[in-house]
Image (cartoon, rainbow, N blue to C red):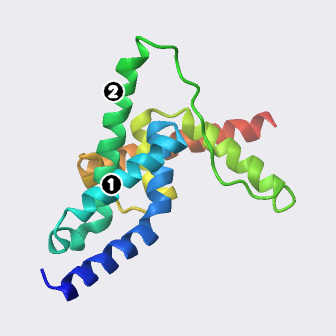
């Protein structure tokens, strides 16, 4: 490889890290339940990207990164669940950037309620809804990431949103 090609690959990797590190970390944190593990998963994802030829992943970089991240996070989660049988259960830490209280208390409360409702959905619905609305992925990308058909992704999103709408309506009626 020439020095020019190496510099281009290095710039490409830096751009990918700048663009996807934050969203992938949030995604991995939801899958692993731990911010530190999520950072490790994302770091491993980018290390794996470094070993891939640029030309083989460039056309579907987001899908590739999310898929590798998801698979590694799920592997870690499975290994940890096996270990839990021998150890005490861990406390799931859910850390996220917090806005200042004066910025929008009402918005924060509404968002908290929505996330609580989302957490009550089945895992597969949670995952596709988060990929769609928190990470801005298309149905096609979500299908590739989760190894489901596009139509199955659509059904999961539809059912998840329908359930959330019904719960919001119930909450408004009770209030």
Observer-nearest of 20 and 155 = 20
| Residue 150 visible to an observer of this rendering | no
Q: Position of residue 59 (x, y in %)?
A: 22, 73
In the image, 4 versus 106, the foreground residue is 4
Crowding at mark 1 (Cα within 10 Å: few <14, some 14-19, many 20+)? many
Image quadrant where one finds the C terminus: top right
Q: Position of residue 164 (x, y in %)?
A: 57, 42
What residue is drawn where x is 43% and y is 17%?
Answer: 84
Q: Secondary structure at mark 1?
A: helix
- Rounded to the nearest angstrom, the CA distance separating label 1 from label 2 is 18 Å
Provide the residue designation for mark 2: 79
Determine which quarter of the picture holds residue 19.
Answer: bottom left
- Label 2, residues with CA under 10 Å away: few <14, some 14-19, many ≥20: few
Q: Which labelled disc corresponds to residue 45?
A: 1
> Of all residues shown, which one is farthest toward the front?
3
Instruction: Determine contact: label 1, label 2, CB under 8 Å.
Output: no
* Outermost residue to the right: 102
The residue drawn where x is 29% and y is 43% is 71
Please state if 174 lies on the left or on the right of 72 as rendered.
Answer: right
Residue 111 vertical position relative to residue 140 in the rendered view, above or below: above
Helix or strand or loop: what does disc 2 sit on?
helix
Locate residue 150, reporting x and y percent: 26, 53
At x 26%, y 83%, the residue is 8
Could you say which is closer to the camera, residue 52 or residue 28?
52
Q: Position of residue 140 (x, y in %)?
A: 28, 60
Q: Quadrant of the N terminus?
A: bottom left
Q: Residue furthest bottom?
A: 4
């Amino acid at each position: 490889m020439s020095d020019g090609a190496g510099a281009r690959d290095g710039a490409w990797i830096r751009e990918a890290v700048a663009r996807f590190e934050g969203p992938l970390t949030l995604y991995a944190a939801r899958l692993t339940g731990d911010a530190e593990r999520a950072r490790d998963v994302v770091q491993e994802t980018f290390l794996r990207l470094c070993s891939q030829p640029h030309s083989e992943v460039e056309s579907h970089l987001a899908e590739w990164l999310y898929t590798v991240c998801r698979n590694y996070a799920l592997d870690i989660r499975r290994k940890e669940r096996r270990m839990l049988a021998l150890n005490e259960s861990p406390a799931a830490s859910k850390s996220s950037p917090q806005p200042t209280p004066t910025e929008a208390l009402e918005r924060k409360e509404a968002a908290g309620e929505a996330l609580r409702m989302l957490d009550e959905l089945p895992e597969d619905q949670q995952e596709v809804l988060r990929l769609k609305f928190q990470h801005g992925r298309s149905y096609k990308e979500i299908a590739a990431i989760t190894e489901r058909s596009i139509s199955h992704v659509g059904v999961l999103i539809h059912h998840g949103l329908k359930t959330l709408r019904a719960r919001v309506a119930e909450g408004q009626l009770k209030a």
